[in-house]
Image (cartoon, rainbow, N blue to C red):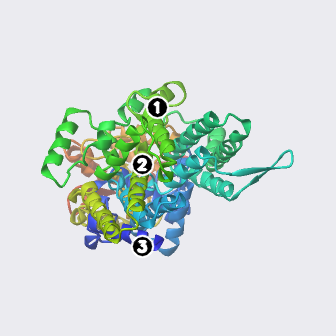
Amino acid sequence: MYAVTALLACAAVGWAMQLWNAEWRVPLFYHSGGDASFSSMLVKGIIDHGWYLHNSSVGAPDGLQMEDYPLSDVVHFLIIRILAIFSSNFGLVINFDYLLTFPLSAVSAAYVFRRFGASWGASLGPAILYTMLPYHFMRGEMHLLLSAYYLVPLIIMVAVWICTSRPMFEIVGSWRIRPTRYGWSSLIIAALMAGSSIYYTFFGTFLIGIATLIRIVRRPCTRVLIAPVIVLAVTFCCVTIYLSPTLLYQARHGRNAETAVRSVRDAEIYALRITQLVLPVTGHRLAFFSRVKRVYNGAIVNTESDFSTLGAVAAAGFLLLCAGLFFQPAGPAWKIFNDLCILNVACLLLATTSGFGSLVALLITAKIRGYTRISVFIAFFSLWVVALAADALRRLYQRRTLLVFAWHAAMAVILVGGILDQTTPAFAPSYAANESDYRNDEMFVRRIESALPANSMVFQLPYAAFPENGPVNRMIDYDLFRGYLHSHHLRWSYGTMRGREGQILQQHVSSLPVSHMIEAVALIGFSGIYIDRYGYPDNAKALERELTGVLHQDPVTSRNSRLAFFELSDYAGELRRSMDSDQRPRE
């Protein structure tokens, strides 16, 4: 049945994204650029260099050191590393990695539902709807690490174990503590949680803390602290281990205050909106719902909270959780309902606009800012309640064959209707545009590689800081990575870490008058200049006119006329020959 769940998830995402139109070696979101290019760089960096931390192919001449931009997603990077064993094509790897998150999320959700007694009939639909959340499609390959939320159900399972006093650790003798099977499972999940997105780790530890408070209120005893303290300690230790390269690097080179700069205001901008949870998905298939959502989005400053839509089925479960604060249904099927209600409202109080998350940003750290990302936790609570309600209804009529048949039919209708409600035609990528952009860039970079020796360096313009520079005219963030994505033996200037010497040097060189800039670039050792014309208000016409005047050559241009390239080999040779040994810069 887990295999059936995985296959149904694959079929559902294949239909929603029209994957029969995909060219598998082209990233599904290549045309989108931006964060999708950043994700592709990470994947190709792992393929080319074994891991994501060091990439000598970008950030030339020194290379990219990612320790200043800490990512604790070790579990996900390991999966990418394993996939890279079977293919060196970054497009194939990133596509398979992203699509793999759909069956993994569905199986993970179904596993938790089943562990708490739900029948397969009641578990299957909610599990598929969980993996088909609009959040999953809207994140896409742009936020590849956030799309991998398949550990969230397991994290929630540990929190519920703590709430329900599952025997996770036994005290043997006067001091020895021995894990039970629940304990071993919770420790493994804690280690995996620490290696997932830092947001999911933060929200998971928060829920474990709330679960601990619930258990203490029900049974005031110091022994109830043993399980949560051990789980949180293992989580903290694993996060420290996963981030140890960053900690050691910054101890050696100093903390870089210019990367991942966050403000208290961000926690308000990227907070959760309850309205976005229950409103229809943007671009809904039904015109009325689409219009309602469009009117709302037009009335607010719309951020990624738009990604948090639950869909009608999960929204019904969410409303039940809110109502559950005022009543408690009777019966064994609902024995964990109260725990889910409390955990759900805790998530709301933390993440909603002007919630406790803003106080965390003000008083503790502003590094956690995207509180709307807790919506995948709320979605799981909500769909779990749907599974509980469906199972309670099934048991009520289990002795009536006709009604049981009607129940199964209703579950099938809810599943199909839920998928239609949660997805839109816009979730299918622009495959023609993807392939057109990809082939254009591929052909252009191949022409550059054929003209330059292996290991040559290419200076990229316009200057853009890394990471999180923002758009430069029509060139959006991380677009300059496109050169690297198609090359095999060149080194590219973009990708030098903000706040370090290489970035300061590049910023200075690119700000020089064109004649001086060309001279400096050539003396540093670059063999060519790559220009993204979208980065200039005049499509780089003035810049290219000056370059042509100095270099006495016309640029090589891409098929779509967006990219241009000037070779510096002849110019650099003449420049070096014209300098005597005292003027030549030392290596």
- The answer to whether the residue labelled 3 contacts the one labelled 2, judged by CB atoms less than 8 Å apart, is no
Q: Secondary structure at mark 1?
A: helix
Q: Secondary structure at mark 3?
A: helix
How many residues crowd around disc 1 within 10 Å: few (fewer than 14), some, or many (20 or more)? many
Q: Secondary structure at mark 2?
A: helix
Front label number (3 vs 2): 3
Instruction: Kindly report the distance in space between the C-alpha atoms of the residues bearing marks 1 and 2.
Output: 16 Å
Residue at the (21%, 59%) spot, across then down: 425
Q: Earlier in the sequence, mark 1 or mark 2?
A: 1
- The answer to whether the residue labelled 3 contacts the one labelled 1, judged by CB atoms less than 8 Å apart, is no
What residue type is disc 3 on?
A: Val
Residue designated by label 2: 376
Instruction: Kindly report the distance in space between the C-alpha atoms of the residues bearing marks 3 and 2.
Output: 23 Å
- On residue 4, the disc is 3
Residue at the (46%, 56%) spot, across then down: 42
Which of the 4 image quadrants contains residue 577? bottom left
What residue type is disc 2 on?
A: Val
Task: Give the answer, above or below, for where 29 lies relative to 309.
Answer: below
Residue at the (66%, 37%) spot, across then down: 219
Residue at the (40%, 68%) spot, across then down: 399
Residue designated by label 1: 357
Front label number (1 vs 2): 2
Q: Earlier in the sequence, mark 3 or mark 2?
A: 3
Q: From where the camera sits, is residue 231 visible?
A: yes
